[in-house]
Amino acid sequence: MADLIQPTIRTREQVERDLRRGVPMHLAPGETAGRPTSKPEWLKVRVRYGENFSELRNIMRERGLSTVCEQAACPNIYECWEAREATFLACGDLCTRRCGFCDVMTAKPQALDADEPAKIAEAVTLMGLKFAVVTGVARDDLDDGAASHWAAIIQAIRAAQPDCGIEVLIPDLKGRKQSPRDSLATVIAAQPDVLAHNLETVERLHPQIRPGFGYAQSLELLRWATELHPTQVTKSNLIAGMGETEQEMRAAMADLRAVGCDVLTIGQYLQPSVSWHLPVHRWVHPDEFARYKDFGEQELGFAWVESGPLVRSSYHAGKQYRSAAARLAR
């Protein structure tokens, strides 16, 4: 009998590792945490279930695909899906990392779906997309961090829709064996139009909010992208309202520009759950977001900065790319 019971007993470490929400159990606010203050008017979103929303959701469900729009509880899902824009979540829907702001499930992932590139390409075709965004979970369990799978997705979309723009929002590609730079080279060789990797927060808060990543390592990945392919458009994202100061945000923006990042998005942190995610530190006023845009474009020289309370990294991605490409071509 003991042999049958023993495998079901898990250590506290195993329980915490498989926990769905954002931070380790002993650091999470817990069920008794106070609720954040009411959202200001500029953050309130009206739910709109239209025909396009329903059609896109059905396309995803029928092919067993996931979108970060749903997994990360994006506030723009209704607007984007009604406009026939969606961001695919690749490499499964279980992440090997746990970030304090993210609502994507953290657990031991399943094996990669070899048919996923073809399924995503088919969905892009059925949805009539002119610009496809693909993001994905971290896959530290794989030798190359899933780099070859990322390349296969890009190639499949390109083969199915040659005129469709492609943006990939990748993790830092820390695999079990292959170096992150070599894995990045595999992805870039597939020729995405935009190579994105998110810094997410300022240097001081990075160890707390994004413990599985590294501030310097994320910057280095973006630097490598430019070194490997000098004309590659690169992009990153910062989240406001998690405890940073405006001066720290400007410093992070300057760090991104120093490694050659071309496009930047900045948006307000929205706490996915009270019990398991970092609390909202403050609601950032639209005027502050406007200052970030001016600073990034006018003083730092970003080709494009999308900055606003509801902005997310894939929000208006096609428009961002077209605007940035036009400026970079000058």
Image: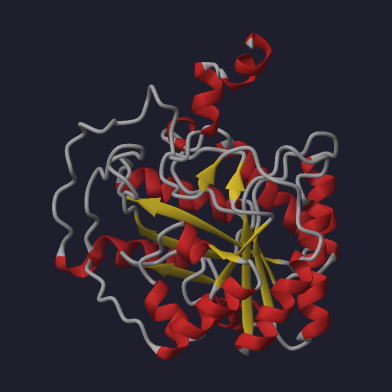
- Residue 190 rendering spot, x and y as whole percentages: 83, 67
* Numbered disc total: 0
Which residue appears farthest toward the top when viewing the image? 2
Which residue occupies 85% across, 39% down? 178
Which residue appears farthest toward the front when viewing the image? 1
**Vertical position of residue 68 compared to residue 127: above or below:** above
Q: Is residue 243 left or right of residue 33?
A: right
- Residue in the foreground of this view, choosing between 279 and 14: 14
Which residue occupies 54% across, 19% down? 13
Q: Is residue 98 left or right of residue 284?
A: right
Which residue occupies 30% across, 37% down? 275
Which residue occupies 39% across, 48% down? 249
In the rendered view, how is the structure colored? secondary structure
Quadrant (top left, top right, bottom left, bottom right) of the N terminus: top right
- Residue 259 rendering spot, x and y as whole percentages: 63, 51
- Residue 246 rendering spot, x and y as whole percentages: 31, 48
Q: Is residue 117 left or right of residue 43?
A: right
* Quarter of the image where one finds residue 270: bottom left
* Quarter of the image where one finds residue 263: bottom right
- Residue in the foreground of this view, choosing between 130 and 193: 130
- Residue 195 rendering spot, x and y as whole percentages: 68, 63
**Vertical position of residue 287 compared to residue 158: above or below:** above
- Residue in the foreground of this view, choosing between 149 and 2: 2
* Quarter of the image where one finds residue 162: bottom right
